[in-house]
Image (spheres, rainbow, N blue to C red):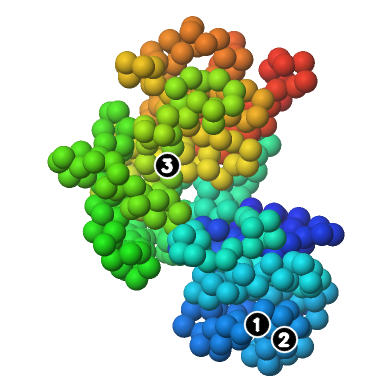
Amino acid sequence: MYRTAIEELHKWKAKRNKKPLIIRGARQVGKTWLMKEFGRVAFEKTVYINFDNNRRMTDLFSSDLDVERIVTGLELYCGQKIDPENTLLIFDEVQEVPKALTALKYFNENAPQYQIVCAGSLLGVALHQGTSFPVGKVEFLNLYPLSFTEFLRAMGNGQFAELLQKGDFSMAAAFKQTYIDMLKYYYYVGGMPEVVRSFSENKDFGEAREIQRRILDAYEQDFSKHAPHNVVPRIRMVWNSVPAQLAKENKKFIYGLIKEGTRAREYEQALLWLTDCGLVHKVHRVKAPSMPLKAYEDWKAFKLFLVDVGLLSCMVNLNQSVLLDGNELFKEFKGALTEQYVLQQLKTLKGLEIYYWTNDRGRAEIDFVADNGSMVIPLEVKAETNLKAKSLKAYRQKFQPKLSVRTSMADYQRQERLLNLPLYAIEVILPMIQIPMSGEFDDNRIR
């Protein structure tokens, strides 16, 4: 299984002054596999240490954090000499021994020759529990479920992923049905590595769904194991309300859907816990689509999306027969799945800040607005081929954006300052929304 994140790991290895690297991501998005695979292909030796229920590591890091002493202890534990030049040190589930996180500071300051990669499924929560975190002494890499192009490769359709990445949309259009079929599978299967691996090998929808249920059960167990006991019921209520929130025509998060009479402050900690764990993505409204979008963020209004579209389809018990009935997938729960899918792809892209926009009356809404550092790009999401978009039209008339993007099941088309991009190609949006120094959009960037 190919993950594009491994290219980022190779770049990290090539740095002269690299710091210990922490891979952040929700449970079961493939952090452990990625670290081990990186060690296998890029290093002569790998030392893998899992800190979960590891009394020896707890004891090793509970004393002073002298690096030389720690390295000696690691060598005794793994039974081999650690050569910093050709050995990758992997600290997995590092949040279970908070002082190991603190130790990364001393590795960076006193022994930067050691190459260390860490991961922890609930690392974000650990940071809120008084851990002495090595601020400024580590680097980060965010890992998400497989994107759609990664899914294509896993399904044996790597050449179709390459067509998209080359921007060869005329050729891609000739094989449009293959992309649509794969997209339907992705809506159902999603990008959790274990689910994708199973489905790519067996094409068994029932087995894929069973694995997704196990993942969801594991998340529920995490709530009880790691979260404060008084917050656990509210975490569950927020988590279980997400499908209903997304099913609304207006997908703004409404606390009243969780429980009648609910107040925002009662669920702030639950939301923080879920976002820190990477289980949900919080997308805020902006009051004005101006640069930088962060300055116009409305903290009171937001949409909430799950970590994975396949888990969303599992939570609503979407039946695989929907996939076999032509476009029925896009007629049942279509808006929720499609927006979830688009946001999930956008989250994998570096350099994009994602928000959404509504006017003050809430009658016009742009599904997403993106800030790429050069301009604000409105992005309208359509689940089918119907390209009518009153809100986007009103937005363009009012704000005169240099470029607008509309993504749907229709074919690629470039119009006057409007890019129609197929849903299956949304992941390759970045090179198409770059603005040259002149400030004008360059048509030659799109084939």
Where does residue 108 sit, x and y in percent of width and height? 74, 66
Q: Amino acid at mark 2?
A: Arg
Q: Amino acid at mark 1?
A: Asp
Q: Please report whichever mark, 2 or 1, sits nearer to the chain's N-terminal start.
A: 1
Which quadrant does the C terminus fall into?
top right
Q: Amino acid at mark 3?
A: Lys
Which quadrant does the N terminus fall into?
bottom right
Determine contact: label 2, label 1, CB under 8 Å.
yes
View extreme (left): residue: 260
Q: Residues within 10 Å of mark 1 (few under 14, many from 20)?
A: few
Q: Please report whichever mark, 1 or 3, sits nearer to the chain's N-terminal start.
A: 1
Instruction: Identify the residue under disc 2.
Output: 69
Q: Residue at x 37, y 41 (%)?
A: 304
Instruction: Report, in whole angstroms, how far the alpha carbon at label 2 lies from the one at label 3.
Output: 42 Å
Instruction: Identify the residue under disc 1.
Output: 64
Tag nearer the camera, 1 or 3? 1
Q: Is residue 443 above or below residue 40?
A: above
Q: Is residue 109 above or below residue 68?
A: above
Tag nearer the camera, 2 or 3? 2
Where does residue 426 sit, x and y in percent of width and height? 54, 35
**Residue 282 shows which numbered tag?**
3
Instruction: Report, in whole angstroms, how far the alpha carbon at label 2 lies from the one at label 1.
Output: 9 Å
Q: Is residue 325 above or below residue 155?
A: above
Q: Residues within 10 Å of mark 2 (few under 14, many from 20)?
A: some
Which quarter of the picture shows residue 44?
Answer: bottom right
Q: Is residue 190 visible?
A: no
Horizontal side of residue 257 vs 409, given as left or right: left
